[in-house]
Image (cartoon, helix red, strand yellow):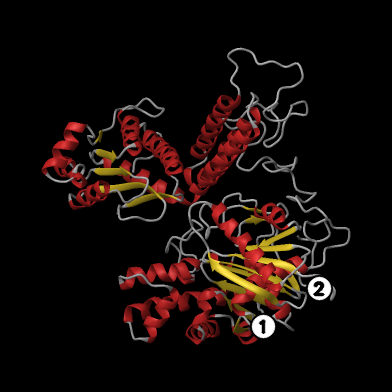
Amino acid sequence: MSGTDLLAPCPGDAGPVLGLDIGGTKLAAAVVTADGTAHGLVTTPTPHTGDWRDATACLFDLGHQALRAVGARGIRAVGIACGGPLDGPSGMLMSPPHLPGWTRVPIGPLAAEAFGVPFVLENDATAAAVAEYRFGAGRGTATMLYLTVSTGIGGGAVVGGRLHRGAAGNGGEFGHIIVRRGGRLCACGRRGCVEAYASGSAIAQRAREACGREMTAAGVTAAVAAGDPAAAAVWAETVDLLGAAVADLVNVFEPDLVVLGGGVTRAGAMLLGPVREVVAREAMPPAARAARVEPAALGDRVGVIGAGVIALAPPPTGSSRPGLGSTHTGPPRAASSPPRGELAASSPPRGELAASSPPRGELAASSPPRGEFAASSPPRGELAAGESVEAGTPTGFEAARIEVSAGLEGGLEAALERGLEAGLERGLERGLERGLERGLEGGRGPMAPAMVHWLESHLDEHVAVASALGELTAEIRAAGELICRRLAGGGTVYTLGNGGSAADAQHLTGELVGHFKRERRPLPAVTLSTDPSVLTCVANDFDYADVFARQIEALARPGDVVVAFTTSGRSPNVVSALDTARARGAATVLFAGGAPGAARADRVLLVPSKSTQRVQEMHTLMLHVISEMVDAWAAGEEPGP
């Protein structure tokens, strides 16, 4: 969308468009007309079920409700606003931190299919900035900054009457200005971002820690008004650090106006007053005098109006940008964009080494690019004319399984070779997804279309969850380092779990007592017993919830580490075991999934999914990463902890 002037006036006769706003807290839809008015606005809380398909189905249903509410007979495009990172031309959401599990979601093509019109996808804060500049508080200004302070914090900048997009189109990530180096962990994976302190979700988390009860951002302001000193301290830090970030932006851009929008700004003067004071005090005097700080004039409608405005913007001359000048109403793709899974020929695929040194786990250079067939290949699931399958040649699901395994291994090895934190996300995305897609393309035995679709949907879900593990790199590293420290001090690793998780526990113990890849000494590790005679003895004399706790009480000592596996995080016997371990002075590591449960541990590796299968698959992946870390330490290939 770099060639489109989003700030240009819409043609007066431009037909209406549908605006869809995707937030971490709520979804919104409305029909937007050329004067910037939202008609038939409908909203609903964002579903967080662990499956993004539930949320997109809800979003599209809202869109149809909005169309019915205004009796719209036709729209010319659908505009979608969502937090990044994203790829606008292809309509792909990459991995928005405020939407866990939304990795490589083709929201644009899905919307085009749902409404039968072209799509436009834009960063939500950029879209809101355009809406405020054209129809809200920014009218008549030359340089305006917009910050949305909601579930997360984003922003957009209009500089000298031109929208600032940045070199890669994702400029305006104002929420990730560092206001406290080494501070709280942000959803982006770094520490000390203003989003980690002043976003709605961060305010609620900090208030829960300070006040000892569940509170929303609105609940915090209410508690402040009621004289709660703990809430007042949380709010004072919030507005101080938000003000510091705004002051830095004022120093950099020297704007006429800073507009604050989003749900947190409903606090009104309680937020605006202190932020203005900090800006006046901390910004350079000329910039501070020039800049006004005002609330968004469009209020809660700014997101959905912004989504509509980007779809109303006139296309550049000769453009076939999806949604603005293109007649393509199926899943569109910008002409300049390479096929899904490919990069331009001039640049190597993301996370790969140069062609002279291909990462382990990849196919040979003669293989077709990811997402393509060789020119002579028949469609997936078919054989070429006259072709036969030799006996013993893997076909169909077996070929897919082989390719998936190779891709997963390649992604894991790439992550480990390049450093866990820097390489895990890229290694997974490249290796795992390449393995999945090539597995599907390579599975050329007879496979019914319905079966192919079923397999693709499950593999897509697997890829989405695996890619989201990039957000856990710091916690995975910390868990591995904790285990290394305890082993270095002479401690023992005790593992436990129920059912399939018991197999994970035995798996980790086996890697420690045996070896992962290197020749090194065996490490002390024990899996707690799940033998029926032990379980029935303890459960009969005490309670089933005590079957692991009694063993921990007998075995664990200060300096040991207890590693528990549970897909839900709520298994009573696992919760009890971890509590007992901490009481005995042992360190604890928890592998779990879904939302935070009752189990507490020093390190929690929480897979962002509620699917038992996906959680267990990711537990295996993470225990392999930790096994590699411990293996390297024990073999002396890394400095001791």
Looking at the rendered structure, the secondary structure element under dot 1 is loop
Answer yes or no: is residue 253 visible.
no
Q: Residues within 10 Å of mark 1 (few under 14, many from 20)?
A: many
* Image position of 130 with respect to 510: above or below: below
The residue singled out by tag 1 in the image is 137
Q: Residues within 10 Å of mark 2 (few under 14, many from 20)?
A: some
Quarter the N terminus occupies: bottom right
In the rendered structure, the answer to whether residue 431 lies left or right of residue 71 reads left
Residue 522 point in image, percent of width and height? 29, 28
Residue 276 point in image, percent of width and height? 54, 84
Answer yes or no: is residue 429 visible.
yes
Q: Residue at x 68, y 37 (%)?
A: 371
The residue singled out by tag 2 in the image is 10
Q: Can you tell which quarter of the image residue 26 is in?
A: bottom right
Residue 543 point in image, percent of width and height? 16, 46
**Which residue in the rendered view is the most extreme toward the right?**
318
For discs 2 and 1, the disc positioned in front in the rendered view: 2
Give how far apart the Cα atoms at labels 2 and 1 are: 18 Å
Q: Can you tell which quarter of the image residue 411 is in?
A: top right
Residue 46 shows which numbered tag?
A: none
Quarter the C terminus occupies: top left
Which residue type does callout 2 highlight? Cys
Front residue of this view, candidates 338 and 72: 72
The tag earlier along the polypeptide, 2 or 1, is 2
